[in-house]
Structure formats: C-alpha cells, structure tokens
Image (cartoon, rainbow, N blue to C red):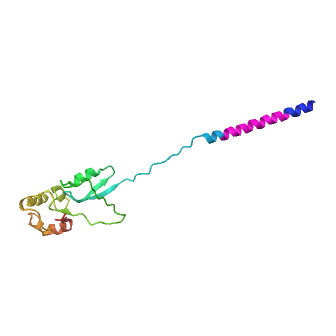
Amino acid sequence: MGKLLDKLWLILILFLVVTVISGGIVLAIKQVQSQPVEIVITPPKIPQYHGQVHIGGAVTNPGYYPWKDGDTLQAVLQGAGLKVEADLSRLKIYVPQVGETYPPQKININRAETWLLQALPEIGLVRAQAIVNYRIQKGLFLRPEDLLKVEGIGRLTYNRIKDLITVDD
C-alpha cells in the first residue's frame, strides 16, 4: 500500500504543477491581451512658407511683396495699400508650380510713393520726389516716356528704368 500511496502523491503533485503552470500561462495571456493599445497619430508637418506674394487689383501699389512664415494676409494687403473700393469678401489666390516664371514687377509711376520709386536704378530721394511733384503739378503720366519731362531725368536714366516702369494698373 506504500507504493500505491507514493504513486498517488506523485500524480497529485504532477497534477498541481501542471495546473499551476497552465493557470499562469492563461493569466499571462489575459494580462497581455487586456493592456490598452496606445495609438499615436502625428500631425502633418506644416511647411514653412517664404518667398513673395503678388498683390494686385484694388490696391495703391500692386506688385510682389515679401512673404515669410508668420506674416498675415492682412499685413501684406495693408502694405500694398488697399483702395476704398476693394472687395475683401472675394480674394483671388494663385499658387504657381515650381519652375513657373512670371514677368518682372513694374512700378506704376502714376501711383508709386517716393520710397517705392527709390527702388529704381539711379532714382534717389531727390528724383523720386521730383516725379511725385510732377504728378501733383502736371497730372498723371500718359506713357512711360513722359518721365523724360521730369527735371533731373535724362535719356540715360530713362533707358535704364524703362523696362521697370509702367503707367498701367
């Protein structure tokens, strides 16, 4: 009866060991399955904008203005000088493709202020003010060549700036 009792104890111990191991495996599987899954969604990277933006239409000084990250459309429009008749409820924005070219900006000598006229080659403060004074006294320029009538602007100066100016909007 001693050997039979030893076999029963051995079977009982083996049964308990198998039960403990099986229970541990089941608990481990349940614990792994019940852990929360963390999903991380990274927001899309916002590109840094810089370059130039063309402002035209109902503005005093149409043309290209510098644009960098953080600038507001309102600030750029203000720099172009909004006219009273400007309709800000409908804006037209055009984004060119990479490599697309556009004609150089021309300065309207009928509307430009002295600071903008000074951007032209050989036009300093004195000549810029002479252009503005001529406009005030004699009226708008009808064609770019009329700039030759302004004191201090000769043929040589005109030839250097003729491709950079306009009298049209």
Q: Nearer the viewer, residue 15 or 89?
A: 89
| Highlighted magenta segment, given as a residue range | 10-29
Give x and y (percent) for residue 57.
22, 59
Q: Identify which residue is drawn at 34% across, 66% down.
A: 100
Compared to residue 72, the image places residue 99 above or below, namely below
Image quadrant in which you'd find residue 23: top right
Image quadrant in which you'd find residue 56: bottom left
Left or right: where does residue 109 sit relative to residue 95?
A: left
Q: Nearer the viewer, residue 143 or 115?
A: 143
Left or right: where does residue 50 sit relative to residue 4?
A: left
Q: Split into 4 quadrants, where in the image is the C terminus? A: bottom left
| Total numbered badges shown on the rendered structure | 0
Give x and y (percent) for residue 134.
8, 61
Q: Nearer the viewer, residue 15 or 80?
A: 15
Q: Split into 4 quadrants, where in the image is the N terminus? A: top right
Image quadrant in which you'd find residue 54: bottom left
Q: Identify which residue is drawn at 59% across, 40% down.
A: 35
- Magenta stretch: residue 28 in it? yes
Give x and y (percent) for residue 109.
15, 62
Q: Identify which residue is drawn at 14% across, 59% down.
A: 128
